[in-house]
Image: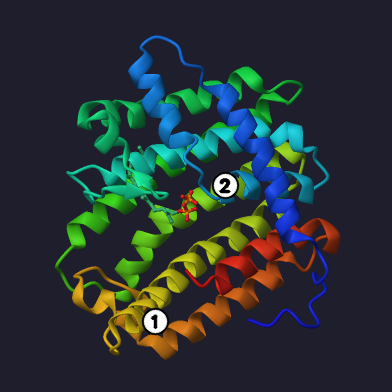
Amino acid sequence: FIMQGSPFQGFEFEAYMAMKAKKINKMLDEAIPLRHPLKLNEAMRYSLLAGGKRVRPILCIASCELVGGDESLAMPIACAIEMIHTASLIHDDLPCMDNDDLRRGKPTNHKVFGESTAFLAGDAFPSFAFEHIACNTNNVSPDRLVRIFAELSSVIGSKGLVAGQFVDIESEGKAVSLKELEYIHVHKTAKLLEACVVCGVIIGGGNDNDIEKVRIYARFIGLLFQVVDDILDVTKSSVELGKTAGKDLVSNKATYPKVMGIDEAKNFAYHLMNQVVQQLACFDTAKAAPLYHLAYCIANRQN
Ligand code: GRG
């Protein structure tokens, strides 16, 4: 995707990301002290502070700023969302799920603390996240807070993350249609991204039209994230293995290139990026720049 001629050109995106991530990391560090029971809190801190990109909390803060809200207003929600994301990663890595040994370049939670502790650390995060928002948000109308709680809770459970993970696991080894594939990605990835921007706009004081625009934006970047991931899996493994068949073709998981072919998958990614630009067109260009660049980064990443 070429940036030339884009109204969002010239924005110092890397500096913006680094500055926001630093503040988020500090707030996350302070949010979970090493209290009793020590091992449980150590396990929670281990995964929470393991150095993720912080895309979700930054999306939340950028959306709050998009509609004129201050960063500090969105910070508790941004941190809460990163806690929920972390919980889903801990559970996803467990032996009964993906059974992974490494996450964010470090041994997975259950490898370090044992399976039962990892389970419980993951269990503790979502409720802690809601408590964190409730106890750290001041001077916001109850109406807006209730909308945020409704939005966030609905994307976690059996209508969101859990549903996506369930269908993904059930579909392993089976032929998966494009519709089913989209269901999995929308629920596992896009819905939480959607909650980030919607909650950011609500806390920032945005109106229903703003909420609708960012909601659609997030659906597109969620799908974009997954399509690009799948394309990279094919191209990366082609280079690594020195042959045309990629990793996804030997694993039994559904991917976009497998379902629609690599060229069509690339066209789809291009179409999604165009849709993103359209959703941001009605906002102030300077304020929308971080959201544009986040999408651009997702579309252009190389690993
Ligand atoms: C306990 C809330 C909860 C849910 C349980 C296990 C499960 C249900 C859901 C799994 C969902 C899952 C693993 C989705 C994948 C999401 C995804 C795209 C992860 C990678 O995100 P990045 O690249 O990672 O932002 P970093 O490490 O940078 O944060």
Vertical side of 267 occupied by 176: above or below: above
Q: Residue at x 69, y 64 (%)?
A: 293
Residue at left 67%, top 59%? 213
- Check disc 1 and give the amino acid type: Thr
Q: Residue at x 56, y 66 (%)?
A: 298
Above or below 182: residue 127:
above
Considering the numbered disc 1 on the image, is that residue within a helix, a strand or a loop?
helix
x and y, in percent, of residue 23 in the image: 69, 36
Q: Is residue 126 visible?
A: no
Please determine whether, in this image, residue 166 is positioned above or below residue 271: above
Between 203 and 105, the one lying in front of the other is 105
> Separation of disc 2 and disc 1 at Cα?
26 Å
Secondary structure, mark 2, is loop
Q: Position of residue 142 (x, y in %)?
A: 67, 24
What numbered label is drawn on residue 173?
none
Q: Amino acid at mark 2?
A: Arg
N-terminal label among 2 and 1: 2
User: Dot 2 corresponds to which residue?
Assistant: 54
In this view of the protein, can residue 67 be seen by the observer? yes
Horizontal side, residue 232 vs residue 252: left or right: right
